[in-house]
Amino acid sequence: MNPQEFDKLLSKYADVLVHIGLGIRKDQILMIRGILEDAPLIRKVTASAYKASAKYVDVQWNDEITSRLRFEYADPESIIYIPDYMIHLYEDYMKNGDAQLAIASNDPDLFAGIDSDLLAKSRKARMQKFEPLRKYENISNWCVAASAAPSWAKRVFPGIPVAEAQDKLWEAIFKACRIDTPDPVAAWQTHTDRLTKYKDYLTNKCYNALHYQAPGTDLTIGLPEKQVWSGAQESFKNGITCTVNIPTEEVFTAPHKDKVNGYVKATLPLNLGGTLIEDFTVTFENGRAVQLAAKKGEADLRKLLEIDDNASFLGEAALVPDSSPIKQSGILFYNTLFDENASCHIAFGNAYRTSIAGGEDMTDEEFAASGGNKSLVHTDFMIGSDKMDIDGVNADGTHEPVMRNGEWAIDV
């Protein structure tokens, strides 16, 4: 696309992130997190936020190269160090009800060749350090989006010049996020209205379980009695309702921690913070992952599931139709934000409190008794395909079609 067309689309994208993704209100403060290569989008979002009467925009920059250099040259014993000021910074924003935008444009191969034990130590230390902030997670509005950073673009479109790869990735992002439509804001409103109908239908049905069948998969996921399905938009205690993932095609809830049984095959790679896990299968018994095998990254996946006692249990079950525009693009993004919206997926680890009615006000013990899982980990992986059938299982054991051949089988 020519520079003028790109600039126009980038401005539209920024407006969608500010008005749909974040729902910025007058005099709200916005913190943006991104890598240096995200600067063009970050500048557009900053302008859009100020036009929407934001009080202040604070950009927290990161550089992927220096992040890798730490693992290459720092004392291994220091790799768990995280400055206290970082926690205080995020805590101030979250408890004050300020907005946060995270731009996920990371190089899928950033930590290729780095010792998996070192990465696991760092990952666990960061999760432990930030865990106390979860008490603020439903107070302030947030959104996750993406920018076509060069290293990511090269991975998605290899074998062509970087500039051409970036151009192709930007086109894919704009299409997946409905920015190429005549009125992206109106397109998002229509889309979220439809997702809302699915989540409301499933909440009202209150199935006992979901049964998944596909090549390499025969899995039953039990559901809590007080299950709540989410998707499309989230409402926060600061009074703002917004769409926290741009793009999004999912509706989701929490599995019952102890009622997952069977085996499942991942249908897309998992980008675990710069380490790729590919072609893997997992077997569950009474909720816990008891067996796993992967052609690539198995050691890294095992270490993730050892971070705490509940990391090997599930915290999310999400439904996405195979007709999702992201899946139909035919592009493997190597980025969970996009790939999870191309496929039904489940997540190891922590369950969202809002997935169980009244969960936000429960003690940890009450949440666990209701079937919720608490863990430092929350890692999505993709399991859907055009060959997947999913049934809702009623209390009397009867089954009803929910998805057939990867598509919705319910009428909303």
Image (spheres, rainbow, N blue to C red):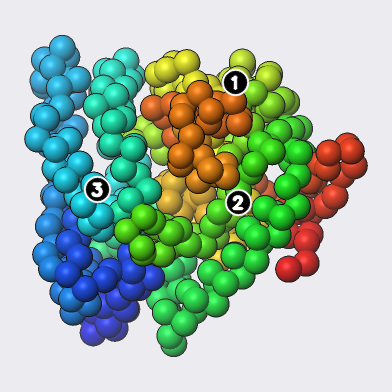
- Kind of residue at disc 2: Trp
Q: In what quadrant of the picture does the N terminus appear?
A: bottom left
Disc marking residue 173: none
The residue pinned by badge 3 equals: 94
- The x and y percentages for residue 15 are 30, 75
* Residue plotted at (34% across, 37% down): 134
- Kind of residue at disc 1: Ala
- Kind of residue at disc 3: Met
Task: Answer left or right for 290 relative to 62.
Answer: right
The residue pinned by badge 1 equals: 289
Task: Answer left or right for 19 relative to 342.
Answer: left
Q: In what quadrant of the picture does the C terminus appear?
A: bottom right
The mark that comes first in sequence, 3 or 2, is 3
Tell me the CA gap for discs 3 and 1.
33 Å
* Residue plotted at (31% across, 30% down): 131
Disc marking residue 229: 2
The mark that comes first in sequence, 2 or 1, is 2
Query: Can you tell which of label 3 and label 1 is closer to the viewer?
Result: 3
**Is residue 188 at all visible to an observer of this figure?**
yes
Q: Is 177 drawn above or below residue 133 in the view shown?
A: below
Q: In the rendered image, which quarter is residue 32 located in?
A: bottom left
Q: Residues within 10 Å of mark 3 (few under 14, many from 20)?
A: many
* Residue plotted at (41% across, 48% down): 335
Q: Is 380 drawn above or below residue 76 in the view shown?
A: below
- The x and y percentages for residue 311 are 48, 23
Frontmost residue, 252 versus 109: 252
Tell me the CA gap for discs 3 and 2.
24 Å
